[in-house]
Image: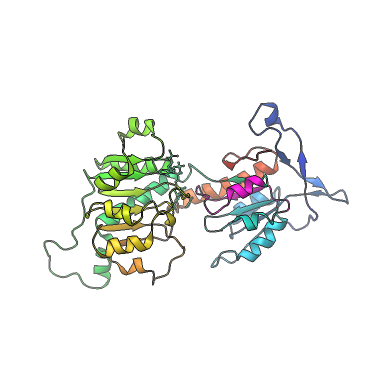
């Protein structure tokens, strides 16, 4: 770590070259190194909420002072993050770091929160905007990887892979039984996507390879998806009532909170499988437990949960028809590196006075 430079870099209000080009980012805070009282050039201070590999830390250290939460086995405690947010110019965080209004209000000089994720529901973006703090995220680079995992979950739940694996591990594989571990066909079935965005579309594209009939529900229609994938827009009720696989790939918002609730589950076919790779909060887990337990739907493939990490005594894990994963949608090595670099680049761009490539909230003044 570069701890040789002390003092703090400040904020300059000036027009950048981007402004000259008429960018929407004009007349925004431009952050750069400043001289301390002693005339020494002082770098911006960045706090990383996770232990990141040397390549990422070194990249940041070329232009910033960096410190990070070093304990890999536990997330940064809220009180540590609160202390750091008070003095940091930039925060590098992940999906599982809650950054609520109370924390953001403590920030004295914070200019950017850069999350190594596309979803940013853990960050109070309104509070950040009010304080002129940028929020940047990592869309696109994880789309195909997350779609792969979502489809893997769909297939595993449909064809009961966890039960098959357990059967062998538990030495329970006996005589060939005609209807042993029979699951649901994927090919030529109907896939209903709730949230036909980047990931939803990539999942749907995989479905076309299995000759699935694709329907989707968004707040607005996606003509490109309809044209390119042959997806058909339907109202939510029709999607729920007719799909063999209901796949949630919408972001977690006030509107999508428990979009899959008791009523929604009741509308689904008894043979249907729910796949959730968005955020746990989109599904009412108590209602899902009841629906799975009493056979009102057939199964569920879940990469995300309302309170992560879940423990082995979580009620859903007691059900054989649940395929559960520990939020690993984007977890391929290549993709995680791309996300890690992108999140670091966003910080550096902001400190150089450039607009970060993927900003969630642009400062209003
Ligand atoms: N499991 C994992 O590891 C990962 C999970 N994710 C999750 O996936 C989410 C989606 O990512 P991504 O595809 O890149 O995001 P996008 O913004 O590209 O897509 C989200 C889609 O959801 C739609 N949507 C928003 N609100 C609603 C609503 N109320 N009802 C129906 N549809 C809605 C949007 O369309 P419209 O505005 O027209 O409604 C949009 O098309 C992320 O927010 C994140 O939570 C992402 C990566 C990895
Ligand atoms: O859950 C992961 C994300 O990138 O969002």
Q: Is residue 116 magenta?
A: yes
Magenta residue span: 108-130
- Check the image and tell me how it is coloured: rainbow
Count the marks: 0
In the rendered image, residue 89, in percent from the top left (x then y), is placed at 70, 51
Residue 16 vertical placement versus 244 (above, below): above
Quadrant placement of the C terminus: top right
Q: Which one is in front, 203 or 276? A: 276
Q: Is residue 321 visible?
A: no
Viewer-proximal residue among 253 and 16: 253
- Furthest-front residue in this view: 263
Q: Can residue 20 be seen by looking at this rendering?
A: yes
Quadrant in the picture for the N terminus: bottom right
52 vs 142: above or below: below
Q: Residue at coordinates 12% horizontally, 65% vertically from top-left?
A: 176
**Image side of residue 66 versus residue 125, left or right:** right
Find residue 204 and report its image quarter. Answer: top left
Q: Is residue 159 left or right of residue 21?
A: left
Q: Is residue 135 magenta?
A: no
* Corner quadrant of residue 314: bottom left
Q: Position of residue 279 (x, y in %)?
A: 44, 54
In the depicted view, which residue is nearer to us: 360 or 66? 360
Residue 100 location (% of width, % of height):
59, 56
| Residue in view at x 58 percent, y 48 percent | 125
Residue 68 is situated, as x and y percent measured from the top left of the image, at: 64, 60
């Amino acid at each position: 770590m570069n701890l040789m430079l002390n003092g703090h870099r400040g904020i300059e209000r000036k027009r950048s070259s981007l402004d000259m080009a008429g960018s929407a980012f004009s007349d925004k805070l431009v952050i750069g190194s400043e001289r301390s009282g002693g005339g020494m050039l002082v770098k911006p201070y960045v706090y990383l909420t996770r232990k990141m590999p040397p390549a990422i830390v070194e990249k940041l250290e070329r232009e910033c002072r960096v410190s990070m939460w070093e304990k890999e086995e536990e997330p940064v405690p809220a009180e540590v993050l609160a202390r750091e947010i008070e003095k940091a110019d930039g925060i590098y965080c992940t999906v599982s770091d809650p950054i609520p209004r109370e924390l953001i209000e403590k920030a004295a000089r914070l200019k950017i929160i850069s999350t190594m994720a596309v979803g940013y529901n853990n960050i109070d973006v309104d509070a950040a905007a009010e304080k002129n703090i940028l929020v940047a995220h990592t869309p696109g680079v994880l789309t195909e990887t997350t779609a792969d995992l979502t489809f893997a979950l769909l297939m595993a739940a449909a064809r009961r892979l966890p039960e098959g694996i357990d059967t062998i591990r538990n030495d329970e594989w006996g005589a060939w039984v005609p209807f042993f571990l029979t699951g649901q066909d994927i090919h030529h079935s109907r896939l209903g996507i709730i949230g036909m965005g980047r990931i939803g579309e990539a999942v749907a594209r995989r479905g076309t390879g299995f000759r699935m009939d694709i329907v989707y529900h968004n707040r607005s229609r996606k003509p490109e998806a309809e044209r390119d994938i042959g997806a058909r827009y339907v109202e939510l009720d029709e999607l729920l009532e007719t799909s063999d696989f209901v796949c949630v790939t919408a972001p977690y918002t006030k509107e999508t909170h428990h979009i899959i609730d008791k009523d929604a589950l009741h509308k689904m076919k008894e043979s249907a499988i729910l796949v959730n790779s968005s955020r746990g909060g989109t599904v009412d887990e108590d209602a899902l437990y009841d629906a799975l337990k009493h056979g009102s739907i057939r199964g569920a493939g879940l990469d995300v949960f309302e309170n992560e990490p879940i423990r082995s005594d979580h009620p859903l894990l007691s059900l054989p028809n649940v395929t559960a994963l520990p939020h690993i949608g984007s977890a391929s090595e290549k993709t995680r590196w791309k996300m890690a670099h992108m999140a670091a680049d966003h910080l550096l761009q902001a400190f150089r006075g450039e607009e970060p490539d993927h900003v969630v909230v642009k400062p209003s003044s």
